[in-house]
Image: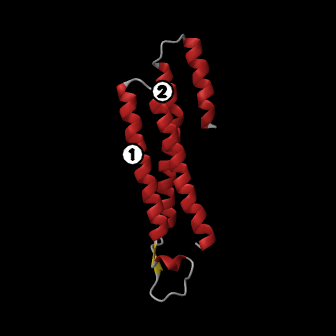
Amino acid sequence: YTPRTLFPYTTLFRSMAFVKISIALLMLRIVVARRFTYIIIISMVLVALWSLAELLFVIFQCRPVKFQWDTKIEGGFCTGKFVSSALAFSVMSIVSDWFYALLPISVIWSLKLDLHSKISIGLILSLGLM
């Protein structure tokens, strides 16, 4: 990392978390079933904690932190587990993306609409999966 690349990574992690949490807050205003409310709140907490873990890992993967952009510091080191941690963070991000894309479909399925309307609305909402 350099100072030019560290800032975009941390900004990306924060912005992805804020987008997902804002979608969850919007869904909280729509759902009426108690079970969906609990599921959404739990998912918001998980996204916030996971994003915080990502942010902290990226910032503190090297000791001292300054070693990320100044590798001439004596005694500095990085964990070297960036690829495996990036893979784990990516999997969690993909799972939460799919969750927030599919949850509205299950909410709509429980509404009192005819089958044709449910399928039409579900297909429109599933466009977010592309």
Left or right for 130, reference 66? right
Quadrant position of residue 11: bottom right
| Residue identified by numbered label 2 | 30
Image height of 109 relative to 47, above or below: above
**On screen, residue 47 above or below 101:** below
Number of marks in picture: 2
Circle 2: is it few (<14), some (14-19), or many (20+) Cα within 10 Å? few
Q: Residue at x 46, y 54 (%)?
A: 51
Q: State if disc 2 and disc 1 touch (CB < 8 Å).
A: no
Please state if 104 lies on the left or on the right of 126 as rendered: left
Task: Indicate which label's residue lies in the foreground, 1 or 2.
Answer: 2
In the picture, measured across the screen, residue 85 lies left or right of residue 124, that is left
Q: Which mark is residue 23?
A: none
Q: In this rendering, is residue 6 above or below 25?
A: below
Residue occupying the far front of the picture? 29
Q: Residue furthest bottom?
A: 74
Q: From the image, tell me which residue sits under label 1.
A: 45
Q: Position of residue 46 (x, y in %)?
A: 40, 47
